[in-house]
Image (tube, rainbow, N blue to C red):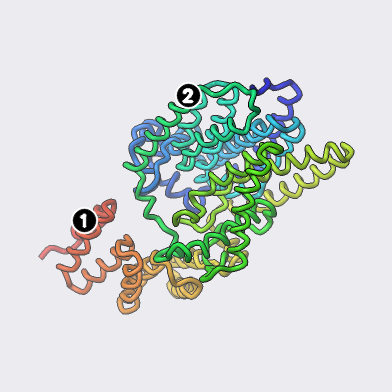
């Protein structure tokens, strides 16, 4: 059983918390950036605690996912602060501080207090966390991590009800919280044989909670299973792995050397390989090292085994190794996997303590933490506002088609249609396999009455994704303008059947038509 914290260790834990919160204090001046606007700023459920509670049977975003506890946390912050973005950012930093403390406590079972705290500080300062902590929608990652790690610690302390409650909270915050039971089993398996076993009732309760969540997710948020990254559309297993394995290699590199960060890891940023490559080989080696290496050191370094396999389990749903997901890679998906970097550093500090002088260990530790803190602080301003976010993405990664697409949308919004046309064309030249880009570009051209240019884009979008909502809208408008009322009605019926949340828009278009 874990020992209670000593006064000294309480001070070290406070240091981890203060460091994690302090490095993100600049975000208290930031606003709503990118997805924050739709998920928080424009979401009535995120503004009212009663509405958030009533929304426990509603999807998280549009018709996808199921994260009611995350929405409730936004509603609490909104109510307390009156909707100030700075307060919500500050609370993200607080949740990150709690997660960092829990990392240190998880590591403290097998490591010395100094080594465990060093690992917690690495987690607190790791630059890969900037997207999850500085972006408000990253709250889901933070809450899920707190729930998962809290459940493991509660089980260690034999607080069974609290462990189950933490597991449920993790699941209701983000889908990968379903691995919480697996983490508890893994952690128990790695403990010393003389440790008392966990009761069967704990595993039964965890199984029931997991099954209930999966049932709720299937009923409410399962449309997310159809959300596939455009680069994987029509790809067979081998083709998917040709892209997914380089993504694994890049993810591992971000955890080990987080200097070159990006808000987008789509085609060109990570090359869309069409055959097995050295990068894919590297990704395969990473997979083998994590699985086989974790097994090999399970007795000599159980902390590393736990961290490696927990990282793998948390990353697996978005890894595209078993099935295609909606992203190739996102830094926020590496929030829990950064536990591996923290554990590796903690183990390195413990190893060095037996071979180096304390002064040398301290100097190296401070140097590493300073580099991480410096990179985090230089990365944070990217998330200050939408303008900074987009300009930084385009400057750092001009090969990002998504960046040029976003720029086109901004330029169209301010009425610079000529520049918007050029940015749309640039995005298409970088990657022409995204039906959502085709649809958005077509709707833009429809707005300019350029039906001749819009039609082939609509056709291409619907060939790749037959029920792409924006493509259906564009095709519907083209039919109406062309006087093909029957075609317009048929398209509206198709949309109502396959994208029912769009029904109100089609009804409004018919209502706005002049009556004859």
Tell me residue 458's x, y (percent).
Answer: 32, 71
For label 1, the residue is: 507
Is label 1 in a helix, a strand or a loop? Answer: helix
Q: Quadrant of residue 56?
A: top left
The label nearer to you, 2 versus 1, is 2
128, 211: nearer the viewer: 211
- Residue 374 in sight from this viewpoint: yes
Q: Is residue 112 left or right of residue 103?
A: right
**Numbered label attached to residue 123:** none
Separation of residues labelled 2 and 1 (CA atoms): 55 Å
70, 387: nearer the viewer: 70
Q: Is residue 54 left or right of residue 419?
A: left
State whether residue 292 is above or below residue 445.
above
Tell me residue 378's x, y (percent).
Answer: 68, 53
Determine crowd level at label 1: few under 14, some 14-19, many 20+ residues with C-alpha closer than 10 A: few
Q: Is residue 509 left or right of residue 216?
A: left
**Numbered label attached to residue 200:** 2
Q: Is residue 24 left or right of residue 323?
A: right
Query: Residue at (71%, 25%) from the top-left corner?
Result: 10
């Amino acid at each position: 059983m874990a020992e209670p914290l000593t006064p000294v260790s309480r001070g070290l834990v406070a240091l981890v918390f203060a460091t994690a919160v302090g490095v993100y204090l600049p975000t208290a001046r930031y606003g709503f950036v990118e997805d924050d606007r739709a998920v928080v700023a424009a979401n009535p459920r995120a503004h009212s605690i009663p509405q958030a509670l009533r929304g426990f049977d509603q999807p998280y975003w549009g018709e996808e996912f199921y994260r009611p506890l995350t929405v409730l946390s936004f509603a609490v912050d909104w109510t307390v602060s009156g909707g100030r973005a700075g307060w919500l950012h500050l609370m993200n930093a607080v949740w990150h501080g709690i997660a960092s403390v829990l990392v240190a406590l998880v590591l403290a079972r097998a490591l010395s207090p100094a080594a465990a705290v060093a690992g917690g500080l690495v987690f607190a300062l790791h630059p890969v966390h900037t997207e999850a902590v500085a972006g408000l929608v990253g709250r889901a990652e933070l809450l899920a991590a707190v729930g998962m790690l809290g459940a493991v610690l509660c089980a260690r302390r034999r607080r069974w009800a609290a462990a189950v409650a933490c597991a449920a909270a993790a699941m209701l915050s983000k889908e990968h919280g379903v691995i919480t039971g697996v983490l508890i089993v893994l952690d128990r398996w790695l403990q010393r044989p003389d440790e008392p076993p966990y009761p069967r009732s704990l595993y039964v309760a965890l199984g029931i909670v997991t099954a209930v969540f999966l049932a709720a997710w299937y009923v409410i948020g399962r449309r997310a299973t159809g959300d596939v990254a455009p680069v994987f559309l029509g790809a067979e297993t081998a083709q998917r792995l040709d892209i997914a394995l380089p993504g694994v290699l890049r993810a591992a590199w971000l955890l080990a050397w987080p200097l070159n960060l990006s808000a987008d890891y789509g085609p060109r940023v990570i090359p869309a390989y069409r055959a097995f490559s050295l990068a894919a080989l590297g990704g395969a080696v990473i997979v083998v090292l994590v699985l086989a290496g974790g097994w090999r050191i399970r007795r000599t370094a159980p902390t590393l085994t736990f961290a490696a396999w927990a990282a793998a389990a948390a990353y697996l749903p978005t890894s595209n190794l078993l099935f295609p997901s909606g992203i190739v890679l996102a830094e926020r998906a590496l929030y829990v996997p950064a536990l591996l970097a923290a554990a590796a550093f903690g183990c390195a500090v413990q190893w060095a303590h037996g071979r180096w002088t304390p002064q040398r260990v301290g100097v190296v530790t401070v140097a590493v933490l300073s580099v991480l803190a410096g990179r985090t602080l230089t990365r944070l301003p990217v998330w200050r506002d939408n303008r900074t976010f987009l300009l930084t993405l385009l400057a750092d990664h001009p090969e990002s088609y998504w960046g040029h697409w976003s720029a086109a949308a901004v330029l169209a919004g301010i009425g610079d249609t000529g520049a918007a046309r050029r940015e749309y064309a640039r995005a298409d030249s970088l990657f022409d396999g995204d039906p959502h880009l085709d649809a958005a570009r077509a709707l833009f051209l429809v707005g300019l009455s350029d039906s001749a240019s819009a039609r082939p884009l609509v056709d291409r979008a619907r060939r790749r994704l037959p029920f792409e909502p924006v493509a259906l809208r564009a095709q519907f408008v083209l039919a109406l303008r062309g006087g093909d009322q029957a075609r317009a009605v048929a398209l509206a019926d198709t949309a109502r059947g396959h994208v029912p949340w769009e029904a109100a828009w089609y009804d409004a278009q018919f209502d706005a038509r002049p009556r004859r």
